[in-house]
């Protein structure tokens, strides 16, 4: 992770934490540093949300979130918070 990306967060804990919001349909919203690179590594399709309130938030298919969580928790030792939301 570059120094510039690390400066986006206040503390080491914030850099390490990933939040995954699972919606009603087929999408999950991802918050955290370095996630686009990991999604590419796993071959998981992803996009930025088009909604004005979430324009810069990464999205991926719900059925592939488990693959991402396994990589984040096992290899990178990151804290993951999974939340169910209504969109």
Image: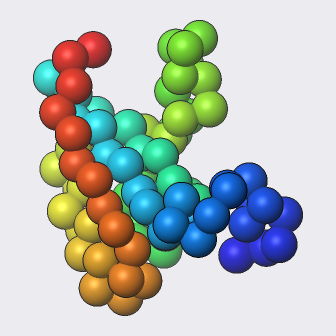
Number of marks present in the image shown: 0
Q: As drawn, is 24 to the left or to the right of 29?
A: left
For the residue pair 38 and 31, the one nearer the viewer reads as 31
Residue 5 seen from this side: yes
Choose top left, top right, bottom left or bottom right for residue 23.
Answer: top left
Furthest residue toward right: 4
Q: How is the image coloured?
A: rainbow
Residue 5 horizontal/vertical position (percent): 75, 62
Relative horizontal placement of residue 41, taking residue 1 as reference (left or right): left
User: Residue at the location (70% across, 75% down)?
Assistant: 1
Query: Residue 81, how many percent across, how many down?
Result: 28, 53
User: With 87 as the anchor, is 10 left or right in this view?
Assistant: right
Q: Is residue 50 above or below residue 30?
A: above
Which of the 4 quarters of the picture holds residue 69? bottom left
Whole-percent x and y of residue 7? 78, 61
Q: Is residue 37 visible?
A: no
Place residue 24 in its image quadrant.
Answer: top left
Residue 53 x, y percent position in the rendering: 55, 14
Taking the image as shown, residue 30 lies to the left or right of residue 12, namely left
Q: What residue is at 19 percent from the left and 62 percent from the top?
A: 66
Q: Quadrant of the C terminus?
A: top left
Furthest-bottom residue in view? 75
Front-lying residue, 65 or 44: 65
Q: Residue at x 67, y 56 (%)?
A: 9
């Amino acid at each position: 992770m570059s120094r510039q990306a690390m400066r986006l967060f206040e503390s080491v804990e914030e850099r390490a934490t990933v939040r995954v919001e699972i919606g009603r349909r087929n999408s999950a919203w991802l918050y955290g540093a370095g996630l686009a690179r990991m999604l590419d590594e796993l071959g998981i399709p992803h996009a930025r949300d088009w909604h004005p309130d979430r324009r810069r938030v990464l999205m991926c298919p719900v059925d592939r979130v488990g693959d991402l969580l396994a990589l984040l928790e096992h290899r990178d030792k990151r804290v993951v918070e999974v939340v169910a939301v209504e969109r």
